[in-house]
Image (cartoon, grey):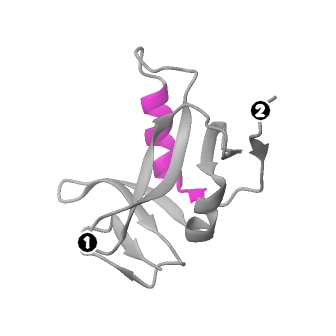
Amino acid sequence: MSTTSLVNIPVSLTPGAITEIARLMAEPEFDSTQKLRIGVKGGGCSGMTYILGFDKIETDDEQFEIEGIPCIMNKNHSLYLYGMEVDWQGGLNSRGFTFTNPNASKTCGCGTSFAV
C-alpha cells in the first residue's frame, strides 16, 4: 500500500509555466510514469534551492494536479513552498522557470535560491 496522499494544491503554475510543462510532457521521449516534482534542497547562495523536474513518486510524497499536470511534493517541503508561484520566462534575456515564494525571507540574484 502506498503512503502517498492527495492534498490541496500548495503551489500555482502560471499559464506560461503550464504551457511549457505540457510541451515537455508531449515530447516523444517523455517518461509518462513520472510526475512533476516541485520541492527544495539545501544549497545555493541563500541556503535552499528549488527543485522542479520530472520524477517518480516516493514514499513521503503528496500528490496534486494543476491543469491536468500531475505533481508531487515531499510532505515536508510544503512548509517552505506553500503559496509559491512558478512561472516560465521565454524572453531573450531571461529564459527558464522563475519562482515567486511568499515564504522566502531573502532570495539571491539568480532567483533559484532562497532563505526562510
Which of disc 1 and disc 2 is earlier in sequence? Answer: 2
Location of residue 83 by image quarter: bottom right
Q: Nearer the viewer, mark 2 or mark 1?
A: 2
Q: Of the numbered discs in the image, which one, if any, rests on residue 30?
A: none
The main secondary structure of the magenta stretch is helix
- Residue 11: x percent and y percent? 61, 60
**Is 24 or 80 nearer to us in this picture?**
80
- Residue 10: x percent and y percent? 67, 60
In the picture provided, is 116 more to the left or to the right than 73?
left
Q: How far separated are the C-alphas under marks 2 and 1? A: 36 Å
In magenta stretch: residue 85: no
**Is 110 or 50 nearer to us in this picture?**
50
Location of residue 45 by image quarter: bottom left
In magenta stretch: residue 24: yes
In the picture provided, is 7 more to the left or to the right than 32?
right
Residue beneath disc 2: 2
- Residue 40: x percent and y percent? 46, 58
Mark 2: which amino acid?
Ser
Q: Residues within 10 Å of mark 2 (few under 14, many from 20)?
A: few
Q: In the image, is residue 101 above or below residue 22?
A: below
In the picture provided, is 38 more to the left or to the right than 97?
right
Residue beneath disc 1: 45
In the picture provided, is 108 more to the left or to the right than 2?
left
Residue visible at 61% across and 37% down in the picture = 58
Q: How crowded is mark 1: few (under 14 residues within 10 Å), some or many (20 or more)?
A: some
* Range drawn in magenta: 12-25
Instruction: Residue at the far left: name it.
Output: 93
Instruction: Residue at the far bottom: name it.
Output: 105
Are circles 2 and 1 on residues that touch, CB within 8 Å? no
Residue visible at 62% across and 44% down in the picture = 72
Residue visible at 48% across and 28% down in the picture = 25
